[in-house]
Image: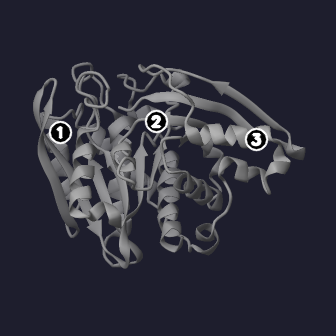
Amino acid sequence: MRRLKNRLDGVAVLAGGVLSLGMIACTQGKSNAAAPAGAAKEMAAVSKGVGAVEDSSAAFGFGMTRGAESAGSAPKINAARAMQYTKEVTAFGARPIGSANHKKLEDYIVAHLKGDEVDFDAFTADTIEGKFPVRNIIAKCPGTKDGIIVIAGHYDTNYPLRATGYVGANDGGSSTAILLEFANQLRGKKRDGYSVWLVWTDAEEAVRKWSETDSLYGTRHLAERWQKDGTAKKIKAFLLADMIGDADLNIDRDGNSTPWLEDLVYEAATKLGYQSHFFERSTAVEDDHLPFMKIGVPCADIIDLDYGYGNVFHHSPQDTLDKLSPKSLQIVGDVILQTVWMVDVR
C-alpha cells in the first residue's frame, strides 16, 4: 500500500509554553522528500515562540471551529461487530485484484448492502502485470443537505505478496470492515445533513512496485469519473480510513491532506476523549486520497503507519488478526462519524 515519505516526531506542548521538537526522517521503500508544506509552516510558527499565536494548539492547526462547538453527538459504532467483519474478511485469505478470493469479497460486501442504494465504478486496469478487472463499490446514504461526504477505504490486498501467506488483516481488512459497520449506522433513514457515500476502493495496491502509475488504480479512475460528471464539486469532505485496526493505535497527521479537515478530525477525537491516539507525529502519505486532492476535493487520510516496531508488520505476513483490537476500531469509527457530523455544521 502507500508509502510514508517523511515524518515529524515528538511534537509536544509542555507546561509554561515550552515546546520540544524532534525531527526524524525515515524511508518505507521510497526515498525521502522535503517536509510537507503544512509541517514546515507549523515548525516556522513554533520557532517564533508561543507568544506568536493566541493558543499554542493553533500553531499546529488544532484550533477549535464552529463545527466542533455546534455539532451534535454522532452515533457510536458496534466495535464487536466491526471486529467480526474484520475476521470474516480476513478469513478469505489473500485478496489481490484478479483473484478468486477478491471476487468472493466483492460479493460479501455487496451482500451486506441489501437495502442500500449501491453503485459500481467498474473498469479494466491495464497494468505492468497485465489487465485486471477493478470495481469500486459505492453505497449511497441520502441526506437533507445538498452535498456529499465520502468515507472510503480499500478492500484489495497486496498483489506482490499474494503467494506468501499474507492476509492483510489491518491493511485491507480493517478498512473493509469499518465501512460495513458505517453502513449499519447510516442505513434506514435520511440523515439530517449531507449525503454520505461509502466507497470500498479497489486496486489501491501496486502490482509490482509503488509509483504514480502503479498504484491507486481504483481512485484514480473514480476521481476522473466524478470530475467529469460534476460529482467532485459536490463533495464537502473525503475521509479515508486505512490501517486503522492496530491494537497500538497512533493515527498520523498527514501532510498530503487538507489542513482544515485534518484539524476537524483532531477536534472530533478531542470531543470524544480520544486525542491521545491522534497526531503525535506528522507524515506525508501516498494513499487513495491523492487523486481527489489533485482535483480540489478536501481530504483527510486517517491512517496508522506505525504498525509494529519500525512498522515491521506492514506489508508482511505478520499482518494478522492478533495484532488488531476492537477498541481501535471503536476509536477510529466513532471519530470518523463525529467528523461527519461536524462537517455537516461547518
Tell me which residue sits at (51%, 61%) in the image.
Answer: 339
Front in this rendered view, residue 246 or 88: 246
Q: Amino acid under label 3?
A: Val
Earlier-in-chain disc, 3 versus 1: 3
Left or right: where does residue 43 sit relative to residue 172?
right
> Which percent across, then down, holds residue 184?
34, 64
Label located before the other in sequence (1 or 2): 1
How far apart in space, not on screen, are marks 3 and 1 (Cα)? 47 Å
Which SS class for mark 1? helix
Which mark is in front, 1 or 2? 2
Residue shown at the point (55%, 71%) measured from the top left? 73
As measured in the structure, the alpha-carbon distance from the residue carrying label 2 to the one carrying label 3 is 23 Å
In the rendered view, would you say 125 is above or below 113?
A: above
Residue 71 tag number: none
- The residue lying toward the viewer, choosing from 242 and 263, is 263
The answer, for residue 250, to whether it is visible in the render is: no
Tell me: 154 left or right of 52: left
Q: Is residue 19 visible?
A: yes
Q: Which amino acid type is shown beneath numbered disc 2?
A: Val
How many residues crowd around disc 2 within 10 Å: few (fewer than 14), some, or many (20 or more)?
many
Q: Position of residue 207 (x, y in %)?
A: 22, 26
> Against 264, is 245 above or below?
above
Structural crowding at the residue carrying mark 1, measured as other residues with C-alpha within 10 Å and reported as few (<14), some (14–19) or many (≥20): many
Residue 115: x %, y % from top left:
21, 70
Q: Amino acid type of disc 1? A: His
State the residue position of label 2: 285
Q: Which residue is mark 3?
A: 46
Q: Quadrant of the N terminus?
A: top left
- Residue placed under numbered mark 1 in the picture: 102
